Amino acid sequence: MERDIKRHKLEVVRFAFADQHGVLRGKTLVAEEAHSAMREGVTMTSTLLAKDTSHRTVFPVFAAGGGMGLPEMEGAGNFVMVADSATFRVLPWANHTGWVLCDAYFPNGNPVPYCTRSLLRAALDRCANQGFAFMAGLEVEFQLFKLEDPRLAPESLTWPAEAPAVSHTTHGFQYLTETRFDAVDPIMEVVRKTMQALGLPLRSMEVELGPSQFEFTFAPGIGLEPADQMVLFRSAMKQVARRHGHLVSFMCRPRLPNAFASGWHLHQSLLDRKTNKNLFVSNDDKPLSPLGRAFLAGLLVHAKAAAAFTTPTLNGYKRYHGVNSMAPIQAIWARDNRGVMIRVLGESGDAATHLENRVGEPLANPYLYMASQIYAGLDGVDRKLVPGPSADTPYDIKAEPLPKSLAEALDALKTSGCFRAGFGDVFVDYFLTIKQAEIARFTADTKGQATSQVTEWEHKEYFDLA
């Protein structure tokens, strides 16, 4: 890092960590200070670990244990960001600027139990102890708008602020048409070159069905790499788009006329740590190996509780809206079928065999999303679970329904022995408190009225998040 800072004549370095929501936060240091910060860490206020998606502090940080039962959290003291030099980048859109991703520790050297990157690392360690490596690939939908009004007038600066006013970049309803892609090629060229300059393994850029809706796919990576790529991708897309008069939103379903819901499909498999052989490859007439089938069964059994991590916003549940939808509504699987939760891709002997979980939303914290998949899948492996038959006609069968709300997902998480064993009681209870505070604000604002429509509360909360 020191050589690169000097070679590229960098003037500043951004030190960042992904918070509990997967939002990048951090500090920018001048290059001269970055050298010592890489060795000694960068201090950050611990209240950042106590915030919900409105950036409100939901724990009584001046109470005993900071309201979390941890003495290190008392009095809104500091934690320390420790740089992972393997993540260092030179940002292509910012002048003479470096960037590095960090892990969170307390000043006494103890790891912060709420550091989601560390939580994924612990899940990966469990994989490694069983002889596996976790491979994942990203398939992410989002919306790209023209920014008309950032809503910076004083009367708009409520908490959370009024969502920016936007106009569309595409008409929509013309799925994968070349002319619609060409119409946005100028801004797509900018973001494509940015992703490539960052070293992100971009594979494809696609025009989706909804107005201003797009999808990017990335080559698979191993371990922390795909999760790190997701947080950098989201942050970079928003920053670069804004500099060119656009706004990228990863909100699942914005409160805009004719808006379509966006998802985040996670492609995943297990590899043999020693040989890198794909352990999901079948050698018989079934589409998955016995290990792959057991892993799949674990994902299905724990789908309700895992939804708290794969779909962590209230808005995300507006995507699961009924029969013949491309979004799943039941914990079922099938071979190459887009109506199910888990799509099995590959044939017997196919080295690229893997599972595609179609349940996630683009705002999910990638570290928690992937860790939940590991813990659920490995529980299936440990217990030798069986996934049941393929749901080839997914809307003609009755199966375990997925949660219809964030509250329902949290109830399942609260009693999940699998995730409490994996993430630990301290983190699960902390996460529940933050998300329940989010629900409480929503309920107070909407007066508890259930609605299938996207509310103004949701639009202000999530439209420009992350």
Image (tube, grey):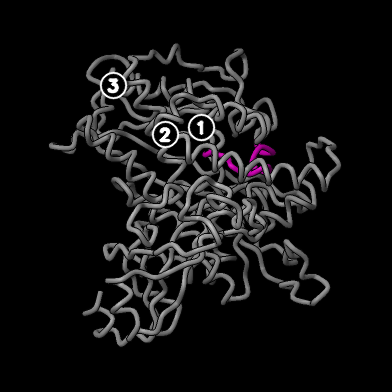
Q: Amino acid at mark 2?
A: Gln
Q: Is residue 390 above or below residue 21?
A: above
Q: Which residues are magenta?
A: 309-319
Calculate the distance from the C-alpha at mark 2 to the C-alpha at mark 1: 8 Å
Q: Residues within 10 Å of mark 3 (few under 14, many from 20)?
A: many
Q: Amino acid at mark 1?
A: Ala
Of the numbered discs 3 and 2, the one sitting upstream in the chain is 3
Of the numbered discs 1 and 3, the one sitting upstream in the chain is 3
User: Please, what secondary structure does the residue beneath circle 3 have?
Assistant: helix
Tell me if label 2 and label 1 are in contact, CB under 8 Å: yes
Q: Is residue 59 left or right of residue 381?
A: right
Pointer 2 residue: 373
Q: Main secondary structure of the magenta part?
A: helix
Of the numbered discs 2 and 1, the one sitting upstream in the chain is 1
Calculate the distance from the C-alpha at mark 3 to the C-alpha at mark 2: 14 Å
Quadrant of the snapshot with the N terminus = bottom left
Percent across and percent down for residue 266 are 44, 40
